[in-house]
Amino acid sequence: MPFIRKSLRRDSQGFGADLRELRQLRGYTREALAKLTGIHTSVIAALEEERLQDMTDPEYAERHVRALATALDGSPQFFLDKYREVLQRHGLRQENKKVMRRRLSRRELMVSSRLMLFGAFVILVAALGGYVFWQAKQMTAPPPLSVDEPREGMQLQTSHLQVSGHTDPTAHLSVNGVAIIVGQDGSYDTAIDVPQGLSVVSIEAQRRYSPIVNMERHVLFERSPELEDVTVPGATSTSSTPPTN
């Protein structure tokens, strides 16, 4: 299929008319050209109709002109020259110098990159410091401790006493100086023997670097007189009364 080519002279017609005619010669609608280049149809229409005052930055729009000319197999420099002539004729180039996007120099880019890296480093150090502080606070803070059993002032009928409650799963726990295993949920449950009379049950919990948390329970163990008179089967009788025939 033969390609249609047209020679565009600088003084033939306006910039927008040349751009529109080239698009039509290539067989593109504005929508198709917008899809090809990624430039919105409203921008293409504004360029073709030379409504350059509708653009917030005519200098920046030069990139669109170059992209459209390249996509339409035209001469980018030809269209850029005509576009700049339109800007100069309307006085837009001089009026928009203040709003032009200034290109950063390589030195400025390096400084900006270093500032970004420094900012990221500061954030990382702050986050790491906060985490270390939180960990240190967790290790030095006293663990929670609760005692479910025994109750304060509990009276016992046997020497066996059940001790249970909750604490921090990472805490070291002891009951009357004997280490007790703490479950993954922080619960503990153990049995101890107490002597007859009033006893103090001391429960202590401590993290590695924290103060010791101590809770005490007072219990009373009194053997029932009925239990003292019970003769254990097989035991030798201590009675002084002689057996009768």
Image: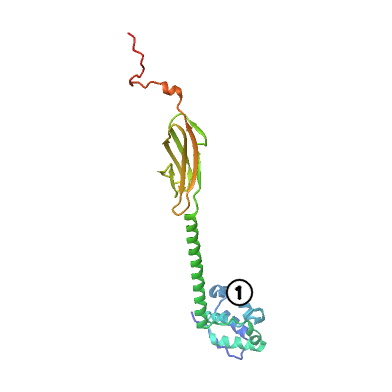
The local crowd at label 1, few if under 14, some if 14 to 19, many if 20 or more residues have their Cα within 10 Å, is some
Residue placed most toward the observer, 111 or 50: 111
Provide residue 238's location: percent of width, then percent of height: 35, 19
For mark 1, give the secondary structure: helix
Provide residue 61's location: percent of width, then percent of height: 59, 80
The answer to whether one can see residue 53 in this image is: yes
In this rendering, the answer to whether 7 lies above or below 138 is below
Provide residue 28's location: percent of width, then percent of height: 56, 76
Residue placed most toward the observer, 196 or 126: 196
The answer to whether one can see residue 149 in this image is: no
The residue tagged 1 is: 41
Image quarter where the C terminus lies is top left
Q: Is residue 51 left or right of residue 172?
A: right
Q: How many marks?
A: 1
Residue placed most toward the observer, 37 or 167: 167
Query: Which residue is most to the front?
Result: 240
Q: Is residue 185 left or right of residue 89?
A: left
Q: Residue at x 34, y 9 (%)?
A: 244
Q: Residue at x 64, y 89 (%)?
A: 88
In this rendering, the answer to whether 241 lies above or below 79 is above
Provide residue 218's location: percent of width, then percent of height: 50, 37
Where, by quadrant of the figure, is residue 48 drawn?
Answer: bottom right
Q: Residue at x 57, y 79 (%)?
A: 64
Residue placed most toward the observer, 96 or 216: 216
The kind of residue on which mark 1 rests is: Thr
Display coloring: rainbow
Q: Residue at x 50, y 53 (%)?
A: 141
